[in-house]
Amino acid sequence: MKPNSKILIIAGSDSSGGAGIQADIKTVTSLGSYAMTSITAVTSQNSTGVLSITPIPSKEISKQIEFTSKDIKPDAIKIGMLNSVGVIKSVIKSLSKIRIRKIILDPVMVAKGGTKLIDNQSIKILKNELLRKVTLITPNIPEAEILTNIKINSKKDMISAGKILIEMGAKNVLVKGGHLSSNVMLDILINKKEIFIFKNKKIRTKNTHGTGCTLSSAIATFYSCGKTLKKSCEMAINYVNHAIGTRPNYGKGHGPINHLNTIIIKKKFR
């Protein structure tokens, strides 16, 4: 099997393998595409929480983006953890140089265990400068609350938050509803022309580490292969649901999901 497309991932590393760059690479690979990376930070973490975060110098992040893209031009870019003003500005500058049209931004702000991963000044730069340069932003409810300064307790609130982000300059917003207390999982895609609601049965489990990273990378992969943005979101949500449903139950805290749920291993490799 040959890769269907090429994805550049700009994100932090997760030593436990459940989220971040590791989850992104697994996702892109499992969906049949080729993953490249620009690592923005190295974290020491496991399913119970984050022990430490070591940032990568901004210049090195830019070098990774530009030197990689100069040789192998990506069909789409997924952006995850950007933990400082310098990093965000470097990424914006590099994006303007390589000029890739399809960019998915997962605004990673808080780890599953509650550790804050980005400072307030960085959030301001992300809102004022990066937001308008991407195709789609995929905040969960806590992230959408931080970005919009409103409290989200319902589907109506999710739509309101999405509209605020559109007014702030976002082209498309997928507000993820996993934090709502409901038996139905709602993810809402919003742009200036339409509002589309994806409904799925919520899977009750603590093992959801890396779902946001996985979803945004899956959207980038499907979108890079020529699917519409709406179809890419739909297919990515289905992939993540299957990954949660077949989770391996690793770790003592918020365990990882099963990124390999799409792969069938040929007999000769077993």
Image (cartoon, grey):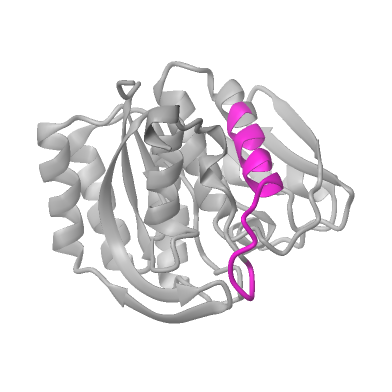
Q: How many marks?
A: 0
Q: Which quadrant holds residue 155?
A: top right
From the viewer's perspective, is 83 left or right of 46? left
Residue 137 in percent (x, y) is at: 52, 43
Residue 168 lies, in percent from the top left, at 54, 46
Q: In which quarter of the image is the C terminus?
A: top left
Viewer-nearest residue: 40 or 151: 40
Q: What stretch is highlighted in magenta?
A: 235-254
- Which residue lies at the image location 32% right of the left edge and 70% below the top edge? 42
Q: Is residue 35 visible?
A: yes
Tell me if residue 249 is in the magenta stretch: yes
**Image position of 33 (left or right of 166):** left
Q: Is residue 193 above or below residue 133?
A: above
Of the 4 image quadrants, the one containing the N terminus is top left
Q: In this view, does 231 lie above or below 172?
A: above
- In this rendered view, identify the residue nearer to me: 206 or 74: 206
Look at the image and say whether residue 220 sits in the magenta stretch: no
Q: In which quarter of the image is residue 209?
A: bottom right
Residue at the spot x=81%, y=56% of the render? 204
Where does residue 5 sit, x and y in percent of width and height? 33, 24
Residue at (44% x, 34% y) in the render: 220
Residue appearing at x 79%, y 49% in the figure: 203
